[in-house]
Amino acid sequence: MSTIPPFDLSEQYKIIGDEVNAAVLGVLASGRYIGGAAVEGFEQQFSGYIGTTECLACNSGTDALYLALRALNIQPGDEVITTPFTFIATAEVISAVGATPVFVDIEADTFNLDLAQVEAAITERTRVLLPVHLFGQPVDMTRLMAIAQAHNLTVVEDCAQAVGAAWAEQKVGSIGHIGCFSFYPTKNLGACGDGGAVTTNDPQIAATIRMLRDHGRRAGGYYHEAIGVNSRLDAIQAAILQIKLRYLDTWNSQRRAVADRYRQLLQHVPGIVLPQEPAGGQGVWNQYTLRVLSPDSTNIQGEPCRRDQVRQRLQAEGVSSMVYYPLPLHLQPIYNQDQQTNHPIAEQVANEVLSLPMFPELSPEAQDRVVYSLKDCLV
Ligand SMILES: *Cc1c(COP(=O)(O)O)cnc(C)c1O
């Protein structure tokens, strides 16, 4: 029996391969490989989908976050409040502009920022709140925006794992001042390479990002008014993304069905805590991440924990699983010098999380095997 992978992009390609091939060949024949109609068309469709007036495509989700902070003129001395339980890019860009990431602990049940602690972490240096909609589950944006407004702060949403997710009927990426998306292949809307986008309703921010992503120039001339970057979306990727965007809602509902089925099959299994969609929000299940509780699940950094044992046994039974993320950012070598605070929930959860195979085309038979093996490994 073949191993069940954590995700399988080839299944999707089987479904849309003909369309994608034709679109790619179309771009090749057009002779227009950077910018042009494919990129502009995608930007328009994507802002329409998210519900903003502006979309700026760029080279990656990391660049989208970096461009957002640059457009807000975030500088050394400024503080940006974010979560320690995320992919490194979220904090990396804060450091890249010379500002200071201020980590705030998470909630164990949503894996997202603990908003009560966000409010307590605000100082006179705080400029931006940078929530991450982790694993595709939305942060309570009503509450977060109220905190931001009360303290006159800007909100940059890291929507890399949450394209299509919504809070109170509004899509993430359209609620904060700026939304940042990644089209890395394993995201819910994935390119066949790198890609990203910024969404906003603020024409000024949009104009600044348009300038910064193209070497700090406006409208393609050779006059440079800022130190910019080269961060463009390739026309080939844009053409592919235009096609995939049409399937996104279908794929997201297939992910939801997979998640519902996992819940049905696993809800009475002891020793694990299943992920849940927050009330008031609509998630998009980029990951199905449960917690494997350890009797002694204190922070045993680097030592094998029960979760690691379960994962190893699963692998031996032909089921691949993933650990996002094994070490919270405040404990990473690049940050553990400056951070005085502990974030006990992030530290505990990092030892417990296990992401099961999750992709729209995951068959019920394969899912049954995952569940059967997991039950077996938990005994
Ligand atoms: C993937 C990801 C990013 C970075 O996106 P890239 O396109 O890989 O640069 C940022 N934040 C989070 C939460 C992500 O999952």
Image (spheres, rainbow, N blue to C red):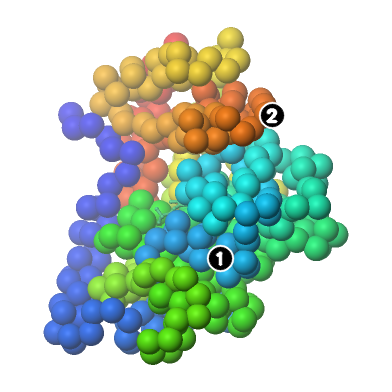
- 339, above or below 227, in the image: above
Count neighbours of disc 1 (C-alpha within 10 A) and say few if under 14, some if 14 to 19, many if 20 or more: many
What whole-number distance in Å separates the C-alpha atoms at marks 1 and 2? 27 Å
Image point (20%, 66%), residue name = 17
How busy is the neighbourhood of tag 2: few (under 14 within 10 Å), some, or many (20 plus)?
few
Q: Residue at x 23, y 84 (%)?
A: 32
- Residue 183 in the image: state x and y as whole percent: 39, 61
Q: Helix, strand or loop at disc 2?
A: loop
Q: Nearer the viewer, residue 44 or 365?
A: 44
Q: Is residue 264 visible?
A: no
Relative horizontal placement of residue 55, taking residue 34 as reference (left or right): right
Q: Which mark is residue 70?
A: 1
Dot 1 or dot 2: first in sequence order is 1
Q: Amino acid type of disc 1?
A: Arg
The residue located at (60%, 15%) in the rendering is 298
Residue type at the position of mark 2: Thr
Q: Nearer the viewer, residue 247 or 137?
A: 137
What is the number of the mark on residue 341? 2
Q: Residue furthest right?
A: 150
323 or 270, which lies in front? Answer: 323
Q: Percent x, y for residue 379?
A: 44, 11
Question: Can you tell me whether the CB of the residue at mark 2 lies under 8 Å from the nearest atom of ligand 1?
Answer: no
- Residue 128 spot, x, y in % from top left: 68, 57
Tell me residue 344's x, y (percent).
66, 25
Examine the rendered structure and indicate whether residue 347 appears above or below residue 262.
above
- Secondary structure category for the residue under label 1: helix
Q: Identify the residue shown where x is 62% and y is 66%.
A: 73
Which quadrant, please, contains the N terminus? top left
